[in-house]
Amino acid sequence: MFKIKSHGFKLLLIFFLLPNLNYALEKAKVIKVYDGDTIKVILNKKIEKVRLIGIDCPERDEVGFWQALNFTKRLTLHKKVLIEYDEEKRDKYGRLLVYLFLEDGRFVNEEILKEGHGKFILIQPNGKYRERLKIAEITAKQNKKGIWKKIK
């Protein structure tokens, strides 16, 4: 039995395992988490504010805010990530709109929804992973996770 020591090989493996990969991925590092769906990264030697596509997490005055914030922090803060864009690259506030992947291949946008820390939101034209994200939200609702705990 042999161990894979090369990070390059692991990244290459992730590229082949990610479904529907039509766009190039960019490497970044998460340096701040603002809330469940907004982070700050270092990307191409620049600091960028980033909004995760397809999810809407509770705002500071809403139930579930702190849980969503802490979940996203645990999952991403100080970690190297891979960024994928959709059709529209920036929102009206200048934030990058992205799908975020961890180096181990986990899809951050989907993980947040699966754990019930946000709601699925479709803002056209960015809908590449809409089915996958909608299923993640449905799964959280069925399992009464996060914000869906008290919903009947």
Image: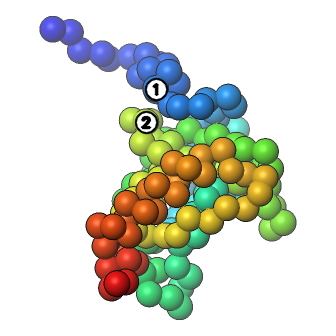
* Position of residue 58 measured from the top left corner of the image (x, y, whole percent): 52, 79
Q: Name the residue type under label 1.
A: Leu
Amino acid type of the residue that numbered disc 2 sits on in the rendered structure? Gly
Q: Which mark, residue 105? A: 2
In the figure, is residue 92 to the left or right of 64? right
Q: Secondary structure at mark 1?
A: helix
Q: Is residue 111 left or right of residue 88?
A: left
Front residue of this view, candidates 79 and 22: 22
Kindly indicate whether the residue at mark 2 contacts the one at mark 1 (C-beta within 8 angstroms).
Answer: yes
Residue at image position (52%, 25%) is 15
Q: Secondary structure at mark 2?
A: loop
For the point 56% across and 50% down, the residue is 131
Q: Is residue 7 left or right of residue 120?
A: left
Question: Which part of the image, by quadrant, shows the C terminus?
Answer: bottom left
Query: Which quadrant of the figure has residue 147?
Result: bottom left
Badge 2: residue crowd in 10 Å (few <14, some 14–19, many ≥20) = some
Q: Is residue 96 above or below residue 10?
A: below
- Where is residue 117 shown, x and y percent of the image? 43, 70
Q: How many marks?
A: 2
Image coordinates of residue 66 in percent, x first then y, are 42, 79
Q: Nearer the viewer, residue 45 or 83?
A: 83
Q: Residue at x 59, y 46 (%)?
A: 129
Residue 38 in sight from this viewpoint: no
x, y percentage for residue 91?
79, 61
**Image disc number at residue 17:** 1
Q: Residues within 10 Å of mark 1 (few under 14, many from 20)?
A: few
Instruction: Indicate which disc, 1 or 2, sits on the residue closer to the N terminus.
Output: 1
